[in-house]
Amino acid sequence: MGRAPCCSKVGLHRGPWSVKEDGLLIQYIQAHGEGHWKSMPKRAGLLRCGKSCRLRWMNYLRPNIKRGNVTPDEEDLIVRLHALLGNRWSLIAGRLPGRTDNEIKNYWNSHLSKKVNENNHQKNRNNRGIKGPKKRNIVTANKVRSLSNKQKQEITNENGETKMTKIKVHQPKPTRVSAVARNVSGNSLPRGSCANNSNNNILEESQTPSEQLPQQLPPYLLPGSTAMTAASNIEGVLLLDEDLVNVSDECYCYDHRQETTSSCEFLIPAKEENNSMLQKIFEDYQELLSAEDGVQMETFVNSLLI
DNA sequence: AACTACTCCAACCGCAGTCTT
DNA sequence: TAAGACTGCGGTTGGAGTAGT
């Protein structure tokens, strides 16, 4: 497969965008729309590569982008979606209107990962009956980055082996979810139509007609975003067993009332009784399950993880 | 006030899926 | 069918800003 020429082409601007460049990009997209990123910079009069333009637009200039002030609700949702999906930032961002994958990724790396790690360590300590903080000689990735080259050498032993221990754990690279969508007639829709699409007629590319789910699904029950959305909106019902996530991405459900866990089966509706939307999501989802005998939560969630 | 350590986030990089010819 | 082009994604980095000493 061929690769697009890299941004490092001679003569192109790099680094932070100026107000003028932003203006040119906004002006061009307002007049001609998104897409054709490759040829856009030239036509817009920008000395940038298309990739850079796309990134700037998607992450910063697009209308309706929310910036900063992540609410506790959003934070909670991010944590739960991350437990469900791992580092699939674009999927997570798709469930948080106005938030970009880059912002969520940054927020996770700078705020939430630490918080979650601390919680997990605390849980583990509690489970093992260990009291008080356990000091460990850990150099985090962030700390290392802030060191000078000399300092970095100093934490490398004489054999050139690094002594530092990164606490960051890389999950296996996820398989990309198909960006191609089709309408009920089987005609392909533009890229990006799948995510967040409010068109209820969109079906997943890989589905054969016999596998197609009932049409006119509510948006949050669309293939490709369904299980995730349903799970994320039905607060407290769906959890992932942390260890199993790392091994097999297996899905578990947790019953808050009975405090029991069982595999991939809805047990109760949302704990927030006053949240009618959450209730409705759950009802719709159950309806879907009963309508489609073969459809189980497990395959539903797994369809996102494959 | 000066220096160092650390945090945060915009931007870049490279890979991989999909489209086009 | 193959190869190039395009696009989207997640990981990583650079450097400005802030906190601590």
Image (cartoon, coloured by chain):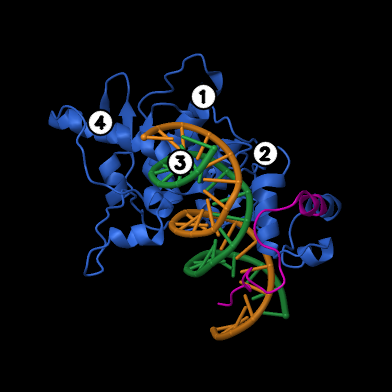
Chain colours: A blue, B green, C orange
Residue A111, how many percent across, how many down? 44, 37
What's the residue type where badge 1 is placed? Leu
Badge 3: chain ID: A
Q: With A152 as the anchor, is A188 left or right in this view?
A: right
Q: Earlier in the sequence, mark 3 or mark 2?
A: 2
Residue found 47% across the figure and 49% down from its top: A88
Q: Mark 3 — residue?
A: A110
Q: With A77 as the anchor, is A34 left or right in this view?
A: right
Q: Judge whether residue A21 is colored magenta.
A: yes
Tag nearer the camera, 4 or 3: 3
Which span is picked out in magenta? A1-24
Count of numbered circles in the view: 4
Could you tell me how far apart the alpha carbons at marks 1 and 2 are, in whole angstroms?
A: 24 Å
Q: With A99 as the anchor, is A306 left or right in this view?
A: left
Badge 4: chain ID: A
Badge 2: chain ID: A
What's the residue type where badge 3 is placed? Ser
